[in-house]
Image (cartoon, helix red, strand yellow):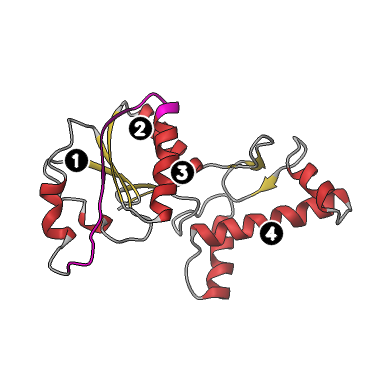
Amino acid sequence: YGMRADALSQVLVSKKWTKVALLHGANDADIAFVEAMRVSLDKFSLKLRGDKEWTAGADIRRSAASEMPLFTQGFKDHDVLIVIDVSDDFGRYVPYNTWRPSLIAGTEGLRPLGWDKTVEQWGAAQLQSRFMELASRPMQSRDYAAWVAVRSVGEAVIRTNSDDPKVIRSYLLSSDFELAGFKGRPLSYRKWNGQLRQPIPWLFC
């Protein structure tokens, strides 16, 4: 979530969309993403103009589609509404349904992803087709993350000629490690937190 939040913040800074509002769900995954997003907004000096949590509750008469215009009415003036709905509970009802016209980003609209079926350059088309043949569906971010993890360990074992976890970990976090990840540049891991350095593809829908 930290990587995706940083990628989103960097795009907002590059576009000079510096005023943002947050609309998010209440489950654990949503909260984890929101916390990463708040850290990122602060890191890149973006202004938070409002923060609301969507809780549907058990009342079946309530509907995100009908309530969203009024629910988004209270936000201060902003350039982008960041929607965080990891479980796909309400987010699909936000685009074109806000109180005022708003650019949507996050888990809806402009989305930072670890991987998407539209990534086809740098040999990625072959990876996509091999996965499709194996799984009978397009490769998603979670699949790509699993592939990178297994491929990283395999590469480290080959390069170090060792199966010692400490040796493998040390090599993975060193400046010597590089992984060809079908993203146009070698991938590597940050030594201080283990985060994968990688280009983040974007999908707008």
Q: Residue at x 49, y 41 (%)?
A: 2
Q: Position of residue 116 (x, y in %)?
A: 46, 56
Q: Is residue 73 above or below residue 64?
A: above
Q: Position of residue 160 (x, y in %)?
A: 86, 48
Disc 2 target residue: 12
Sequence-first tag of 1 and 2? 2
Q: CA distance from mark 3 to mark 1?
A: 21 Å
**Towards the viewer: 4 or 24:** 24
Is residue 39 inside the magenta stretch?
no
Q: Position of residue 202 (x, y in %)?
A: 41, 46
Give the total number of marks visible in the rendering: 4
Disc 4 target residue: 150
Q: Which residues are magenta?
A: 42-59
Q: Residues within 10 Å of mark 2 (few under 14, many from 20)?
A: many
What's the residue type where badge 4 is placed? Val
Q: CA distance from mark 3 to mark 4?
A: 21 Å
**Name of the residue lying farthest toward the front:** 58
Q: Is residue 57 visible?
A: yes
Dot 1 falls on a residue whose secondary structure is loop
Q: Residue at x 35, y 27 (%)?
A: 46
Dot 3 falls on a residue whose secondary structure is helix
Sequence-first tag of 3 and 4? 3
Disc 1 target residue: 102
The image's mark for residue 4 is: 3
Q: Residue at x 17, y 31 (%)?
A: 76
Q: CA distance from mark 3 to mark 2?
A: 12 Å
What's the residue type where badge 1 is placed? Ser
- 171 sits to left or right of 204: right
